[in-house]
Image (cartoon, grey):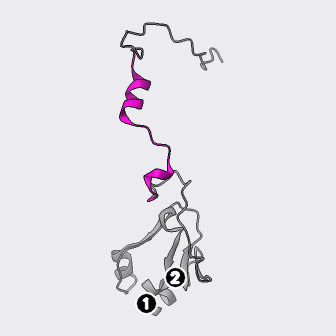
Amino acid sequence: MQFVKYIGPSHVRQITAQEWRQAGLTGDTVIWGNFNGWAVDAEQFTEEQIRRAIDPDPNFVIVGTDEGDEPKPVLNDRATPTTAAAGEFNLLEDSDLDRALSTTTEDGQVDDREDKTPSTTTGGR
């Protein structure tokens, strides 16, 4: 199996249907990002698309893989949302967030203690 892999500097790369038309080609929008390992199955492209748009662009390479070694989503990229299952993350419940932002103690009393967190602000020049 072959893939068109994006190796450029951007977190997300796309070729829109309009961009295909501007190049005199037809095609749907294609997106490369962390959700697909910056690789799209080469079978999604026509030979003409590869010849005229993919091959001349140094930010794309066509790679072959061994069976079972397909590109995988990259889950640590913070620039774009991932499609990973929620169970893979340590998610806060609404009640955890409310408790963290609350000015009451766990027993419902108002917490009027001063914030003792050291300041990171520096004065002067």
Q: Judge from the rendering whether residue 18 lies leftward or rightward of residue 43; answer left or right.
A: left
- Name the residue rendered at 54%, 54% in the picture: 77
Residue 98: in magenta span: yes
Name the mark on residue 64: none
Image-quadrant location for residue 28: bottom left
- Name the residue rendered at 62%, 83% in the picture: 66
In the image, is residue 18 above or below residue 103?
A: below
Residue 34 placement (x, y as % from top left): 51, 62
- Name the residue rendered at 37%, 27% in the picture: 98
Q: Earlier in the sequence, mark 2 or mark 1?
A: 1
Crowd band around label 2 with a 10 angstrom C-alpha radius: few (<14), some (14–19), many (20+): some
Name the mark on residue 54: 2
Q: Secondary structure at mark 2?
A: helix
Q: Judge from the rendering whether residue 58 lies leftward or rightward of residue 89; answer left or right.
A: right
Nearest the viewer among 116 and 89 is 89
Image-quadrant location for residue 17: bottom left
Write down the region rendered in magenta.
83-103
Q: Secondary structure at mark 1?
A: loop
The residue furthest bottom is 47
Nearest the viewer among 22 and 47 is 47
| Residue type (three-letter) at the residue carrying disc 2 | Ile
Residue 22 placement (x, y as % from top left): 36, 80
